[in-house]
Amino acid sequence: MRIATWNVNSVRTRLPRLLPWLDKRSPDVVCLQETKLSNDSFDELLAADLAVRGYQVAHHGEGRWNGVALASRVGLEDVVRGLPGEPGFPEPEARAVSANCAGLRVTSVYVPNGRTPDDPHYEYKLAWLAALKDAVAADTDRAVVCGDMNIAPTDADVWDPAQFVGATHVTPAERAALAELVALGMHDVVRDRWPDQRVFSYWDYRAGRFHQDLGMRIDLVLAAAPVAGRVAAAWVDREARKGSGPSDHAPVIVDLDDAPDGDIGPVVPPPSNPAGIPRRRR
């Protein structure tokens, strides 16, 4: 079973790349962020193309900003848009959608940016993360949280920590909020697979930062321990960040074994190539 997450930074803009990517990578469950469409516009633009590929879809959108989607071809049940008791700015925004997919509780999230540590949006970000933690805590054994967390978990997840001093995404309070979510029993599966490698998922469009690999790892897949134990491969699809008209984020892809833990060992991509494409087992 293949799960993927991608901040597409506008479905409408990225459509010529999104559909070929789906055909090439063939995820069973895909989480999208920053769709920047209303629900009606999303359905009009994309629902038919997803349906012909076998996907059921849940979208939570608001128009020009934000927007998250969850598409699955292994079931999509008990869909919930938003988080219980989530804060707003000033009203709740389209930042989370969750559903049951093949026995997993998958949530696609677009965490608030925070802007600057002295901005009210920063306090909103921390409050939103607290609501996410409470939602995950209600069903930790099968939880998978995918998306743009807008937090680099450690200094190893930014290209130069000195460049981020005083900025959001790396502050102690944000990292502590993410750590509280992980402490529920969740695993950062990409970092588990690549504990010492330089692995990023976001590169600013400016100054050729992608080509210099001056990025951040802020797009995460967090999985409950029973799910993390099934991970056969976890990687960042850098190919999707190349070429003409890419998103500033690359997809993150995780392959899960269908077999119970202990039946067969994990398949790991070659250590020299954390962005490489590992062979799928099943």
Image (cartoon, rainbow, N blue to C red):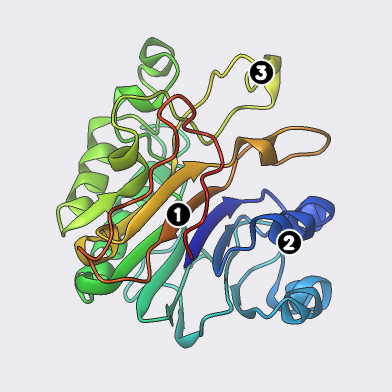
Separation (CA) of disc 3 from disc 1: 24 Å
Q: Secondary structure at mark 3?
A: loop
105 sits to left or right of 134: right
Compared with residue 227, is residue 236 higher up or lower down, i.e. above or below?
A: above
Q: Position of residue 122 (x, y in %)?
A: 38, 42
Q: Secondary structure at mark 1?
A: strand
Q: Position of residue 102 (x, y in %)?
A: 42, 81
- Which amino acid type is shown beneath numbered disc 1? Val
Which residue was labeled with disc 2? 23
Residues packed near mark 1 inside 10 Å, few (<14), some (14 to 19) or many (20 plus): many
Q: Residue at x 69, y 14 (%)?
A: 207
Residue farthest front in this picture: 264
The numbered mark, 2 or 1, whose residue comes first in the sequence reads 2
187 sits to left or right of 235: left
Separation (CA) of disc 2 from disc 1: 16 Å
Quadrant of residue 116 within the rendered picture: top left
Which residue was labeled with disc 3? 211
Which residue was labeled with disc 1? 254
